[in-house]
């Protein structure tokens, strides 16, 4: 269930995603496996927060659902450093290190459980 907040004059909605997903990102021609942390919006613009499964590096990208029926999405990096800093600051008002660590551990447990079932 999404959580709507007002933070520093911005309308922010967290936890818009339903469930978990592991996404393959292609940054600098190197595939990165990333865990979906959150799809959230700031002033009605959607963003996605992903955590690199190996390094735990956080990626914040603009998120656009291109086709609802097919589920096709587009992820765009935030080129403007000031905008990235602002989105990161708002994101950190809701997601702290403990919450992020909890989600990472849930992904790891889910993967271990799946591997045991195979």
Image: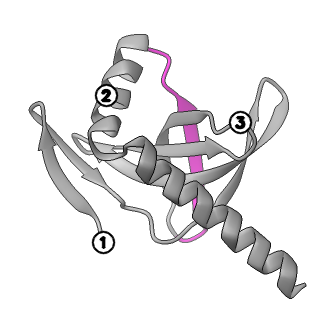
Name the residue that disc number 1 marks: 1
Write the residue at 44% across / 42% down.
97
For the residue labelled by badge 2, is the local secondary structure a helix, a strand or a loop?
A: helix
Write the residue at 69% across / 53% down.
23
Q: Residue 106, how many percent across, how many down?
A: 59, 66
Badge 3 crowding class, 10 Å Cα cut-off, few under 14, some 14 to 19, many 20 or more, is few
Write the residue at 85% across / 76% down.
115
Name the residue that disc number 2 marks: 89
- Name the mark nearer the viewer: 2 or 1: 2
Q: Nearer the viewer, residue 65 or 32?
A: 32
- Name the mark nearer the viewer: 1 or 3: 3
Name the residue that disc number 3 marks: 55
Q: Earlier in the sequence, mark 1 or mark 3?
A: 1
Q: Nearer the viewer, residue 68 or 28?
A: 28
Reply above or below: 8 against 35.
above
The Cα–Cα distance between marks 1 and 3, rounded to whole angstroms, is 28 Å
Q: Earlier in the sequence, mark 2 or mark 1?
A: 1
Q: Quadrant of residue 96?
A: top left
Q: Residue 48, how many percent across, how many down?
A: 48, 45
5 left or right of 44 in image = left
Reply above or below: 62 against 89.
below
Badge 1 crowding class, 10 Å Cα cut-off, few under 14, some 14 to 19, many 20 or more, is few
The Cα–Cα distance between marks 2 and 1, rounded to whole angstroms, is 22 Å
109 left or right of 46 in image = right
Looking at the rendering, in which quadrant would you find the C terminus? bottom right
Residue 65 in view of the camera: no
Magenta range: 69-80
């Amino acid at each position: 269930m999404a959580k709507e907040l007002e933070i520093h004059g911005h309308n922010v909605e967290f936890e818009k995603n339903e469930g978990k997903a592991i996404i393959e990102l292609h940054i600098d021609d190197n595939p990165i496996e990333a865990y979906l942390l959150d799809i959230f919006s700031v002033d009605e613009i959607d963003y996605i927060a992903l955590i690199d499964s190996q390094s735990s590096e956080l990626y914040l990208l603009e998120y656009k659902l291109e086709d609802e029926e097919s589920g096709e999405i587009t992820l765009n990096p935030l080129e403007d450093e000031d905008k990235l800093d602002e989105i990161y600051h708002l994101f950190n008002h809701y997601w702290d290190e403990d919450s992020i660590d909890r989600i990472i551990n849930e992904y790891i447990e889910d993967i271990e459980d799946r591997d045991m079932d195979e």
